[in-house]
Amino acid sequence: MVDPVELQRLLSRVALGKRKAFRALYDATSPSLFGVAVRILNRRDRAEDVMQDAFVNVWQRASSYSDAVSRPMTWLTAIVRNRALDVLRSEGARPTRALHDEENEEVHEPADERPDPLGLLERAVDEARIRDCLDDIRGPQRQCLALGYYHGLSRRQEFHSRRYAARQSGRGRRCALQR
């Protein structure tokens, strides 16, 4: 696992248009991020497309990264996760059971991505911060955030799945996100 301080340094250099820093960032993070994409999409070919789109996005938006808001891996993972969910939604697809390469008729297993002890510690700290934030939010606003993040639902899907009033679903989520 790459040091978060090093990733922050790389992201700040990428924001300045430094190609070597971008390559170093890609080399350091792509195996983990590719695993995220494969787990969501269950197909290597689609995950590769998501990775390309995500890193183009990173190149274009690196200047918007703020270490006060999130850790570098959290920010990068969110970009990949959101892009993968966009692909699923646009194709109207659900993940398949096996990872299947249609061209070669082969089944691929995802890489083992069990984190090292430091990674587990970082993840626990991040989860504690998220729980602290969610503890400050109550009722329908909390439910909307949970549905959106954990299940990848859009506001419209949240509205239909929970039959919330449009005011609670739209404005409540925005208010909760602003907290």
Image (cartoon, rainbow, N blue to C red):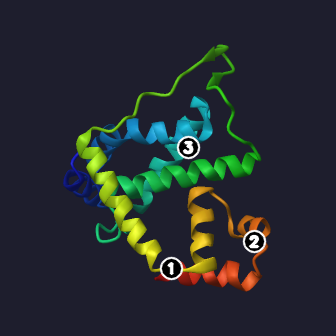
Measure how far apart labels 1 and 3 are at the Cα level.
32 Å
Type of amino acid under label 3: Val
Residue at left offset 38%, top offset 56%? 74
Foreground of the two, 16 or 134: 134
Type of amino acid under label 1: Ile
Query: Which quarter of the image is occupied by the N terminus?
Result: top left
Residue at the spot of label 2: 159
Question: What x and y, as percent, mark residue 170?
Answer: 68, 80
Which tag, 2 or 1, sits closer to the chain's start?
Answer: 1
Q: Nearer the viewer, mark 1 or mark 3?
A: 1
Residue at left offset 65%, top offset 23%? 100
Residue at the spot of label 3: 50
- The residue carrying pointer 1 sits among few (fewer than 14), some (14 to 19) or many (20 or more) residues within 10 Å by Cα, namely some
Type of amino acid under label 2: Phe
Question: What x and y, as percent, mark residue 67?
Answer: 29, 66
Instruction: Indicate which disc residue 137 carries.
Output: 1
Residue at left offset 39%, top offset 35%? 31
Which tag, 3 or 2, sits closer to the chain's start?
Answer: 3
- The residue carrying pointer 3 sits among few (fewer than 14), some (14 to 19) or many (20 or more) residues within 10 Å by Cα, namely many
Q: Quadrant of residue 114?
A: top left
